Image (cartoon, helix red, strand yellow):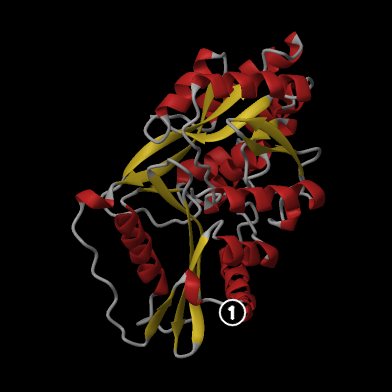
Amino acid sequence: MNNSIPPRLVADALWLLTARSRGGNHWVSNAHCQIQTIEFGGHSHPVSLLEHSDWQECAASSPRSAWLRANRYRLTQSASATARIADALSCLVYGPLSALMHTGKLDQAALVANYLLPTSLYPAWGADDIRLMTERLQTAHPQRPLMMQHLSSEVCPQLMQHLCNLGWKMVATRTVFLSDPQQTHPTSFWPDADVEIVGQDQLNNSDLHELHALYLQHKAEQSYHLQTNFSLAFFELCLETGFVELTGLRWQGHWVGVLGTYTQTDSDWLTAPLMAWDHNLPVSVKPEHLLHDLFIREARQKQLRLHCGTEQKIAPDHSHSAIEYTAVYDQHLPTTQKIANRWFSALFQQCVYRPS
C-alpha cells in the first residue's frame, strides 16, 4: 500500500511550519504578519494576523492595502480626467473608509488559509469543514473579524455558498480574468531558438540567486510596493517542494524571465503568483510574451483553467472578467464593530469598487 503524502500537502506543511516560527516576512518581505494555525478538513491551515499595517504592506497580507491603498494607487496612475478628479476628491471617501475599517478592526482580521499569495485557491471543503472552521476561528480570535480572500462564484461556488449559509458576508473587492485554454486554439510560441525554457527539474540552487535578482529588478521597474515581494527563501522553498512551480527563461546565457504557477488539491484552476522578466532587452526580445504562452501551455497540459489576477497585467487569451469577493464574518463581535463593518462594505462598494 502506498502511504506517501501528496507533494502539495508537504509543501503547504513546510511553508506553514516555518511561517509559524519566523513570521510571514520570511516568505514575503513586505508581509509583516504573525502566522498561527487552525485544524479543519483533516489538515492544518494558516491564519495570518496583522497587528499594524504600514504603507508598504503587501495586499496579500493587509486588507487595508488590498482595498484602500491599491485602489488609491490606481487613481494616481490613471491618465483619465475622471480619475484625476476622483483622486483629488478621494480624501472625502478614503478618510471615512479608513476610520470605519479601524473601528470595525477589518485591518486586524484573522485571514484563514492565507498563504500570502496574490491569489488564493482552495480545496473542495464541505459544509461541515466550513462550520468547524468558523467555530474554531471565533474561539481562537474572539476580538477579530474573520476573513477569507479571493472568492468568486465561478472558481469556488460551493465554498461561497457554505460561507454564506453560516452568515459570512461577501464584499466585492476586485476583478480577475478567467479563461479555459482547452476551448481556444493552440498558442504560437516565440520561435527564437536562442531562448531556452528551463523547467523546475532542471533548476538548481545556484540559479535561484540570479532568478531572484531578476525578480527584484522586475519589481523595481514596476514601482508598485503593494505587490507581493517574495524572498530568496521562498524561491528555495519552491525549488525544494514545488510549492510554486518555477520555470526560467534563458537567452544568450542570461536569465531573462521567470514564471511561477500554483494550483491546489482538487482545484480546476491554475494561477501565476510569480511572473517577472528583464525590461532592458532589445525590442525584438519579448520574454513576457513567452511567459504568457508558457502559462497557457501548462494549463493545457494539466487540463486546468486559467485564473489571472491583476498583478500579472497580462490577461489570458479569450478571457472574461469575474468579480472576486472577500468573505467577512463578524457575528461574534460587539455591535459597534458590526455596524462599522456594514457601513464600510456599503461605502466601499458604492464609492471605490462598484461591481458591474
Amino acid type shown at disc 1: Asp
Q: Nearer the viewer, residue 98 or 57?
A: 57
The x and y percentages for residue 185 are 18, 58
Q: Which residue is mark 1?
A: 207
Instruction: Indicate the quadrant where residue 301 lies.
Output: bottom left
What is the count of numbered marks? 1
- Identify the residue at image location x=71%, y=30%: 109
Q: Return the residue found at the far bottom.
A: 252
Q: Return the residue found at the far front.
A: 1
Q: Is residue 186 above or below residue 204?
A: above
Residue 124 visible in the current orientation:
yes
Pointer 1 local density, CA inside 10 Å: few below 14, some 14–19, many at least 20: few
Q: Return the residue found at the far top.
A: 335
The x and y percentages for residue 63 are 65, 37
Instruction: Indicate the quadrant where residue 187 lies.
Output: bottom left
Asked whether, in this view, residue 167 is left or right of residue 50, the answer is left
Asked whether, in this view, residue 250 is left or right of residue 115, the answer is left
Q: Is residue 286 above or below residue 305?
A: below
Q: Label 1: state its secondary structure.
A: helix
Instruction: Indicate the quadrant where residue 210 lies.
Output: bottom right
The x and y percentages for residue 95 are 70, 31
Q: Quadrant of the C terminus?
A: top left
- Identify the residue at image location x=47%, y=27%: 159
Asked whether, in this view, residue 163 is left or right of residue 53, the answer is left
Q: Is residue 3 above or below residue 146?
A: below
